[in-house]
């Protein structure tokens, strides 16, 4: 069980989505790699948790990165020694040595949020390939928090095939949109191959291990309260819509598997609605 920063207070207003991401950062992490940092709100809140925390903020757009620099150094008055800013599109500028300094703590947490699955997978594959070619892997623990805007099931497949276990999954609703925020541990020593981007017909990938376990619980009286039924239903409906839309471009052999998966998700949706009526 990974201890996260849920109990640690900060003094900056975050959206529910960013608040959830911050709460999932493991307690042992004192170095944050914020990919697609935008204006730096997440990193700002992370630095406020502990005076020893440090962050690398990455964005491919110059104006948001300059805004983040202004917010953190000028407005929030964080020491520039605790910060590094990178105008780039991925993780290639993350120097593993940056986060292996003993003074930084036991672990690093990488956050990639607000991007599509293809972009996220490309970012991860590019960095993993760089580490493999250099034959140099981080010795400390590295955690990864992912919140994709679409096709998160493809990312889960990528993570599963690379033996990166999912540790936690939170389903939230923020501004009428339902998100899944997934926490992984990156086991670099187990990397053997880099799967190509492909669609999944696996319920574990489409729904996430934790949500799937929740939906498979049949004893409604004693069912865990890990997820709000209404939010779980909205996420199910969203994933069904995605699965149906994608099925139009699948081959005949894959289509049969996809339809079975869709039927299973619909049955979970039906059971969840019935449970809500019982409540």
Image (cartoon, rainbow, N blue to C red):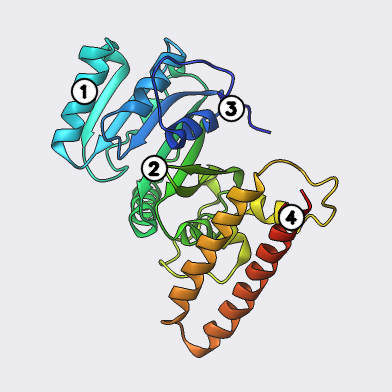
Pick whichever, 152 or 179, lies toward us: 179
Residue matched to label 2: 112
Please identify the quadrant where the N terminus is shown: top right
Mark identifier at residue 277? 4
Question: How far is the residue under mark 4 from the one under mark 3?
Answer: 34 Å
Q: Position of residue 36 (x, y in %)?
A: 30, 40
Mark identifier at residue 4? 3
- Residue found 24% across the figure and 20% down from its top: 71
* Mark 2 or mark 1: whose residue is earlier in sequence: 1
Query: Tag 1, which secondary structure?
Result: helix
As drawn, 15 above or below 132: above
Direction bottom: furthest residue: 252
Q: Position of residue 19 (x, y in %)?
A: 47, 30
* Mark 4 or mark 2: whose residue is earlier in sequence: 2
- Classify mark 3: residues with Cα within 10 Å, few (<14), some (14-19) or many (20+): some
Task: Tell how many labels.
Answer: 4
Pick whichever, 182 or 266, lies toward us: 266
- Classify mark 2: residues with Cα within 10 Å, few (<14), some (14-19) or many (20+): many
Query: Tag 3, which secondary structure?
Result: loop
Question: How far is the residue under mark 1 from the one under mark 3?
Answer: 26 Å
Question: How far is the residue under mark 2 from the one under mark 1?
Answer: 19 Å
As drawn, 192 above or below 43: below
* Mark 4 or mark 3: whose residue is earlier in sequence: 3
Pick whichever, 127 or 31, lies toward us: 31
Question: How far is the residue under mark 4 from the one under mark 2?
Answer: 37 Å
Q: Quadrant of residue 13?
A: top left
Residue 186 at least partly seen: no
């Amino acid at each position: 069980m990974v201890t996260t920063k849920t109990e640690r207070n900060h003094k900056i207003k975050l959206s529910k989505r960013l608040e959830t991401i911050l709460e999932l950062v493991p307690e042992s992490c004192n170095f944050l790699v914020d990919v697609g940092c935008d204006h730096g709100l997440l990193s700002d809140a992370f630095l406020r948790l502990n005076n020893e925390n440090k962050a690398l903020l990455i964005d491919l757009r110059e104006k948001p990165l300059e805004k983040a620099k202004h917010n953190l150094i000028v407005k929030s008055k964080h020491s520039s020694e605790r910060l590094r800013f990178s105008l780039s599109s991925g993780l290639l500028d993350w120097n593993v040595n940056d986060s292996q300094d003993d003074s930084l703590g036991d672990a690093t947490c990488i956050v990639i949020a607000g991007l599509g699955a293809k972009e996220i997978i490309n970012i991860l594959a590019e960095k993993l390939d760089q580490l493999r070619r250099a034959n140099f892997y981080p010795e400390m623990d590295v955690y990864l928090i992912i919140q994709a805007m679409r096709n998160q099931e493809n990312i889960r497949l990528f993570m599963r095939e690379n033996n990166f276990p999912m540790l936690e999954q939170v389903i939230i609703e923020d501004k009428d949109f339902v998100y899944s925020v997934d926490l992984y541990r990156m086991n670099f020593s187990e990397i053997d191959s880099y799967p190509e981007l492909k669609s999944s017909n696996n319920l574990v990938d489409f729904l996430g291990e934790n949500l799937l376990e929740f939906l498979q619980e049949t004893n409604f009286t004693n069912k865990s309260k890990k997820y709000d039924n209404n939010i779980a239903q909205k996420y199910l409906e969203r994933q069904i819509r995605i699965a149906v839309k994608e099925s139009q471009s699948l081959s005949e052999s894959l289509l049969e598997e996809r339809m079975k998966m869709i039927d299973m998700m619909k049955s979970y949706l039906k059971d969840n609605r019935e449970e809500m009526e019982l409540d």
